[in-house]
Image (tube, coloured by chain):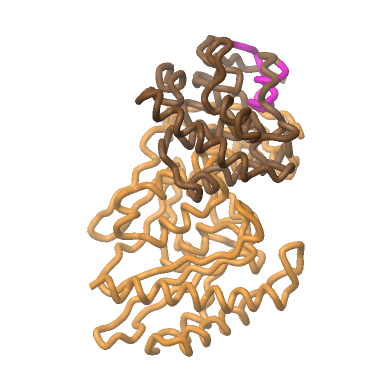
Amino acid sequence: MIPAPFDYVRPADLDGALKILSEREGEAKLLSGGYSLLPLLKLRLAQPGLLVDLRDVAGLDGIIETDDDLRIGARATHRQIHENEIIRNRYPTFADAAGGIGDPQVRNWGTIGGSCAHADPASDWPAVLIASRARIVCRSSAGDRVIPSRKFFLDTFTTAIAPTEALIEIQIPRRGRWTGGGYTKLERRAGDFATAGVCTVVVLDESGRIARAGVGVTGVAETPFAATDAEAALVGATPSDETFRAAGAAAAAQSRPAADIRGPVDYKRAMVAELTARSLRTAVGRAKAWS
Amino acid sequence: MMTKHVSMTVNGEPKEADVEPRLLLVHLLRDVFELTGTHIGCDTSNCGACTVHVNGQSAKSCTMLAVQADGASIRTIEGMADGATLHPLQQAFWDQHGLQCGFCTPGMIMQAAWLLDQNADPTEEEIRAGISGNLCRCTGYVNIVKSIQQAAGALAERGAAPVDGLAVAAG
């Protein structure tokens, strides 16, 4: 499969890339690792006039923790995230998600920013970012815009990024005491996109009840979404299998799966319920161990 | 359509070409540089038959543009043997019957080489996870795993020489 013709530039820095995006608004598309965009180009589902390769743009792949946030640069590869010490020690949910994306070659080159900007309805990162209430930083020549993850994924392959903006950073609220997360997905075969995937994040109060909850679901709607009914069912509840099942039922009810080769609608809803419960078991276990 | 000039090191040799930006790396390697050991299987980033190393990292060359590899150091299956002496991975695939039709083999070997570069003594589980992006439709994974295990042992015996010595040296 051969992509339609396009022109290609590799600017030396971010300002250069943003200038091109402004000058060629609507015509230019950013290229990061390429593992989302190249397949679309080859299928001719995308036919941009100009590709702006970010390969030479330095400083966009850092992973740091500040007093407020975990900050992941947009060009950090899934592998860099998976292997990062801060992520491994303090954000195991992110390590789990990163290590389960695609296959080793995909993780060597694919980036978190590219994956989020692509917004595949079954991709992993959106569920994790939504559950974590992450913020997504987009930059244009006019300045930065910080978009809550829950307002970022608008529809299939559609995000809140403007044509003149580049996604530059993901900001995740710093993990506090009694906080834990879990990401559980079902794959039909190794390396496949998720049939369904659920990320949960819980914060426990001193009595052990769930004070705050985030539930992000992928693969079972036109775009990954926050299962707000499941979150409402969790807040104030004491963690138990019954609580987890109730949240799972609520998440399943909020899903809008389509029947396809990965299964019929009823099956996918049942998987969302089960995956939610399993993810919550992990999240609560991690929260209890994080005093 | 405007072309771009690209230059890169392939198996230690400098190469250059004028290419359309839409040319895929695998087509540059096969059709322009005439290195047809790298195979095109699914052409959809799934099967891994086109796996090569780009700056020491395994990549699916059907999912990378030739222009993205401008300035890079590339290693393909043709860069594995030392003259008439097979690379330990090639020898192991031969000894352990790690192939039937052989179509997936160049990609398997390049991915296995990358894996052993990261982890010189992988468990069976780590080998299976490491080649999860490479499909063998003859269902020969059992012998492929044995082959990689044999090669890991052979490389350990050979000493501390890195598997991907060329890419390390050039990169």
Q: Residue at x 50, y 31 (%)?
A: B151
Indicate the position of residue A208 as horizontal and vertical percent values: 30, 85
Chain B, hue in figure: brown
Q: Nearer the viewer, residue A256 or B81?
A: B81
Q: Which residues are magenta?
A: B15-31
Indicate the position of residue A134 as horizontal and vertical percent values: 41, 62
Q: Residue at x 51, y 81 (%)?
A: A230
Residue A238 shows up from this direction: yes
Chain A, hue in figure: orange
Indicate the position of residue B120 as horizontal and vertical percent values: 41, 36
Indicate the position of residue A222 as horizontal and vertical percent values: 66, 65
Q: Nearer the viewer, residue B154 or B77?
A: B154
Is B122 on the left or on the right of A218, as rendered?
A: left
Is B51 on the left or on the right of B55, as rendered?
A: right
Q: Residue furthest front?
A: B95
Quadrant of the image occupied by residue A43? top right
Give the answer, above or below, for where B148 lies relative to A215.
Answer: above
In the rendered image, which quarter contains the N terminus of chain A? Answer: top right
Quadrant of the image occupied by residue B91? top right
Q: Nearer the viewer, residue A250 or A96?
A: A96
Q: Residue at x 71, y 31 (%)?
A: B102
Residue A23 shows up from this direction: no
Q: How many marks?
A: 0
Give the answer, above or below, for where A137 lies relative to A182.
Answer: above
Is B137 on the left or on the right of A27, as rendered?
A: right
Q: Residue at x 37, y 76 (%)?
A: A284
Is B2 inside the magenta-drawn segment?
Answer: no
In the rendered image, which quarter contains the C terminus of chain A? Answer: bottom left
